[in-house]
Image (cartoon, helix red, strand yellow):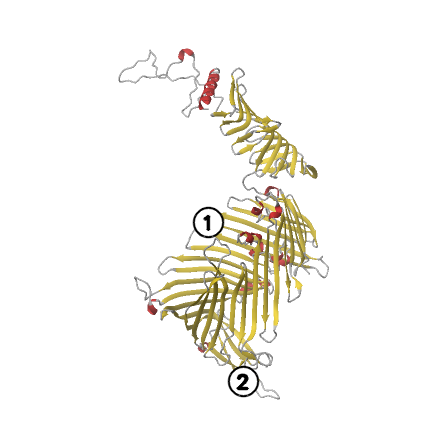
């Protein structure tokens, strides 16, 4: 083959010499020779009229004749598997079967290629074999690839005419009957189809235009454009069209969704997208309703690789109900702020900044007309945290953190903020530890720490949020803590520990109480004054514990189904003592005036000036408690069902069955604390029962108040069951039958970011449609299947909870519900899902949602219906093109819930 190439290369040189030019295909510098016959001398030949001496080198005259410009600017490489034929008479070269030509950044592959040296043109076409047109040309220039039926290309001007071309540009598949390449920046097209369908030969939809101008990497401008679905023209047409083709993000308008609801005709989610730079973008959206309501939203995403990333969302809505002049007219404003910031751990291991903010109006998720996420409407708590932490790598290590936190109850509209709070700590120090070797004994293990906490706490309500009144009752305090602890072994098997903790609390304001006899029209009242200024108090306590671990093993033999059982028991006894700090308490006298029936009386009331402060008042009750706890774990070793497995399988029969109680030595009555029982029983894989109960040994009087009499001595049982809780969670899917235990819960969803559940037990989010909504998690299960019914992917989630209350002899089940969620793929492109439940306490069906999703290849369709809901009922329908470049071509319709209901 190399010999053939050399032979045709010599012929090619010979043809070029006829025109007086030579293009040498050699990596060395190229020389062009075009000299008169009488001046053609060897470069090493010295003319006779040149004088030379041994000391003076010979001088050669420079050639002043400029060579003609090359026709070919690059190396030309060509190949044909069957033959490469050179037609010397017509000055052409023919390549046949799997032929190609490479010229610069241009490559042409085809079944047959003709190179015409007279016109410097290349003709490429496929091969007709038994009526099948095969080996169609593939034209590649730079990053652009075109697959036509045939083409003509001029390797000098780089112009081309391409017939029935197929190319992909910025997510578009462009199919043109005739393509004329003018230069690298302008291409003209005739009878063109634009589509995002993967089936280029038979697209399910396309946009057809007769003429178009294409600027690679930038845009396509067309004339009259009509949309076709299944080769049928639709009424969707434009007199001209503009399709952006930029590979980078570009700013542009976002078309709104048109609809109607009880607020009138509406335009939703319309606005503008700003592609600011590679690290930051901004989306501005707005809603408008003909009754005067409107909404504004600003959303931004930012990222700096290997540094940080995050997003910020600001939402505001002005809600107008009814019409002005009507008695039910109202106008209100709601808002929501969300900020999520994540720092790459590798950027600085010793410092970290993070933010997770979700705050706003308590009524936002229930009243927003552009929020149809049912699960978010059920969230009762909004929480936020912005923190910065720093570690100083010194000896001992020092850690500090500064944070601002927020907690908001959407039912009571109560808001608690810590703005800011500071935490500092010095790592544990062992002052008596040996410099070499391990720590042994009670002295070596003595360790000391230091912790400090400072906080500015604000408690307010939704209506006063971001107003000056919210700062009036702010509480400021600092608490220092120095714990000292040690641990050691007793008789080798007993683990003992002792610790004491010293705390000092600083406050900037306290209270004073007094009884004013003249208040309340002479009846008298307690007056409480707030006293600004620094004040402090100090507390300390002591505790010790003793515990061990006991193992009990029962072996039944390796030939048995159950080879053995192991019982692990961890008993523990603890003792703690808290002194009474009554020196921080004061008294005031409450005087009751005399009446006709009773004489005047006086009563002394004790209080602490530290009551209702940030950390509360120190205890004035001496306590000395002995605590008892017992933890149990029961495991079994069973023979595997798989006969190829030699090792037995370990299973857990009972997981952490705990018993805990305490006895107050210094107490006057009710010395025994209620017995708490908790544990978990794993029934099968992914199914476990968690339980917790409280048993009280004391009886109740006629007013259902605990008395210092054991219940068994009062004619009852040994204990009273005062409260219990049982919960059960079960996740199961078709993948579990194949031994795949992946957790398919979508952890990062809109409901979870709003403070709700990670799963879809309370429905799935439908607030926005972005990208591919039909993301089949089980798509791999369809691969290599001849018939679909061999595998039908599905998943099921169950959650059951029951709470029992009997503190005052009510003996009632305070709550009991069963929730479930399931998704089923009816076919590779059809998915249905349902989320619902039943409330046994209120005897009703909980929020129910039906989901239908259909993958229409280039399109997607979804229908979410909530027929039953404790807050609202609604439905949402969407059909649109998957590709983000044509995301505005869609139809969506929703029934906005009646928030007043």
Q: Position of residue 152 (x, y in %)?
A: 57, 25
Q: Nearer the viewer, residue 10 or 334?
A: 10
Q: Nearer the viewer, residue 816 or 403?
A: 816
- Residue 307 is tagged as 1
Determine whether 67 is above or below 271 in the image.
Answer: above
Q: Position of residue 275 (x, y in %)?
A: 55, 44
Q: Residues within 10 Å of mark 2 (few under 14, many from 20)?
A: few
> Which residue is farthest right?
326
Quarter holding residue 525: bottom right
| Viewer can see residue 68 | no
Determine whether 229 is above or below 865 in the image.
Answer: above
Q: Position of residue 595 (x, y in %)?
A: 61, 87
In this rendering, position of residue 544 left or right of residue 321:
left
Quarter holding residue 566: bottom left
Q: Position of residue 374 (x, y in %)?
A: 63, 57
In space, the residues marked 1 and 2 are separated at their CA atoms by: 69 Å
The quarter of the picture where the C terminus appears is bottom right
- Residue 354 is tagged as none
Reading the image, the residue beneath label 2 is 602
Q: Residues within 10 Å of mark 1 (few under 14, many from 20)?
A: few
């Amino acid at each position: 083959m190399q010999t053939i190439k050399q032979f045709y290369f010599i012929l090619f040189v010979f043809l070029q010499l006829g025109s007086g030019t030579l293009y040498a295909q050699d990596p060395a510098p190229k020389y062009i020779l075009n000299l008169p016959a009488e001046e053609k001398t060897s470069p090493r030949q010295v003319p006779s009229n040149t004088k030379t001496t041994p000391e003076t080198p010979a001088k050669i005259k420079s050639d002043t004749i400029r060579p003609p410009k090359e026709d070919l600017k690059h190396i030309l490489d060509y190949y044909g598997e069957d033959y490469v034929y050179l037609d010397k008479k017509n000055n052409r070269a023919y390549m046949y079967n799997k032929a190609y030509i490479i010229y610069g950044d241009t490559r042409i592959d085809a079944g047959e290629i003709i190179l015409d040296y007279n016109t410097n043109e290349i003709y490429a076409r496929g091969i007709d074999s038994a009526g099948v047109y095969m080996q169609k040309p593939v034209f590649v220039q730079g990053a652009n690839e075109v697959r036509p039926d045939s083409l003509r290309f001029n390797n000098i001007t780089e112009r081309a005419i391409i017939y029935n071309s197929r190319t992909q540009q910025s997510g578009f598949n462009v199919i043109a009957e005739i393509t004329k390449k003018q230069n690298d920046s302008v291409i003209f097209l005739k009878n063109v189809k634009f589509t995002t369908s993967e089936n280029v030969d038979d697209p399910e939809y396309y946009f057809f235009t007769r003429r178009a101008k294409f600027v690679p990497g930038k845009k396509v401008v067309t004339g009259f454009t009509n949309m076709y679905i299944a080769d049928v023209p639709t009424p969707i047409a434009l007199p001209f069209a503009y399709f952006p083709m930029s590979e980078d993000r570009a700013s542009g308008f976002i078309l709104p969704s048109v609809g109607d609801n009880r607020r009138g005709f509406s335009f939703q989610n319309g606005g503008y997208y700003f592609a600011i730079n590679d690290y930051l973008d901004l989306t501005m959206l707005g809603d408008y309703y003909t009754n005067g309501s409107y909404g504004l939203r600003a959303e931004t995403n930012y990222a700096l690789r290997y540094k940080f990333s995050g997003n910020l969302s600001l939402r505001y809505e002005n809600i107008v109900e009814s019409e002005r002049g009507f008695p039910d007219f109202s106008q209100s404003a709601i808002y929501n702020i969300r900020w999520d910031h994540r720092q790459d751990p590798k950027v600085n291991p010793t410092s970290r900044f993070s933010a997770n903010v979700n705050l706003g109006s308590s009524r936002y998720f229930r009243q927003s007309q552009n929020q149809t996420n049912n699960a978010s409407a059920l969230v009762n708590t909004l929480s936020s945290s912005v923190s910065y932490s720093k570690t100083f790598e010194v000896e001992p290590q020092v850690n500090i953190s500064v944070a601002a936190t927020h907690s908001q109850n959407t039912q009571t509209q109560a808001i608690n903020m810590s703005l800011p709070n500071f935490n500092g700590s010095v790592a544990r120090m062992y002052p008596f530890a040996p410099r070499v070797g391990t720590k042994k004994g009670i002295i070596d293990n003595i360790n000391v720490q230091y912790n400090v906490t400072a906080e500015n706490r604000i408690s307010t309500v939704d209506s006063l949020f971001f107003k000056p009144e919210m700062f009036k009752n702010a509480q400021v305090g600092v608490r220092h803590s120095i714990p000292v602890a040690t641990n050691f072994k007793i008789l080798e098997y007993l683990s003992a520990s002792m610790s004491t903790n010293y705390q000092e609390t600083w406050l900037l304001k306290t209270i004073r109480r007094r009884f004013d006899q003249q208040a309340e029209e002479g009846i008298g009242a307690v007056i409480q004054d707030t006293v600004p200024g620094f004040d402090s108090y100090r507390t300390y306590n002591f505790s010790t514990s003793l515990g061990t671990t006991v193992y009990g093993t029962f072996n039944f033999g390796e030939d048995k189904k159950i080879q053995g059982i192991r019982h692990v028991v961890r008993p523990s006894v603890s003792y703690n003592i808290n002194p009474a700090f009554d020196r921080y308490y004061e008294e005031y006298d409450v005087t009751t005036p005399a009446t006709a029936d009773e004489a005047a009386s006086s009563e002394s009331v004790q209080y602490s000036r530290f009551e209702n402060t940030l950390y509360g008042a120190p205890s004035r009750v001496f306590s000395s408690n002995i605590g008892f706890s017992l933890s149990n774990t029961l495991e079994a070793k069973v023979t595997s069902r798989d006969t190829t497995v030699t090792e037995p399988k370990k299973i857990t029969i009972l997981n952490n069955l705990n018993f805990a109680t305490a006895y107050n030595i210094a107490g006057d009555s009710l010395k025994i604390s209620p017995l708490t029982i908790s544990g978990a029983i794993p029934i099968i894989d992914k199914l476990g029962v968690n339980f917790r109960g409280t048993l009280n040994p004391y009886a109740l009087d006629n007013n259902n108040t605990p008395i210092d009499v054991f219940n068994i001595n009062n004619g009852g049982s040994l204990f009273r069951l005062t409260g219990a809780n049982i919960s059960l969670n079960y996740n199961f899917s078709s993948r579990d039958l194949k031994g795949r235990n992946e957790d398919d819960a979508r952890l990062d969803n809109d409901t979870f970011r709003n403070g709700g559940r990670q799963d879809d037990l309370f429905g799935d989010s439908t607030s926005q449609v972005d990208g591919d909504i039909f993301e089949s998690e089980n798509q791999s299960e369809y691969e290599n299947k001849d018939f679909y019914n061999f595998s039908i992917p599905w998943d099921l989630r169950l959650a059951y909870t029951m709470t029992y209350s009997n503190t005052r002899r009510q003996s009632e089940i305070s709550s009991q519900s069963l929730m479930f969620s399931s998704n089923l793929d009816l076919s590779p492109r059809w998915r249905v899902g349902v989320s619902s439940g039943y409330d046994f306490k209120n005897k009703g069906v909980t929020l129910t949602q039906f989901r239908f999703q259909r993958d229409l290849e280039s399109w997607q369709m979804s229908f979410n219906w909530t027929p039953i809901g404790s807050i609202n009922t609604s439905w949402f329908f969407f059909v649109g093109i998957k590709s983000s470049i044509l995301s505005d071509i869609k139809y969506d319709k929703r029934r906005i819930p009646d928030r007043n209901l």
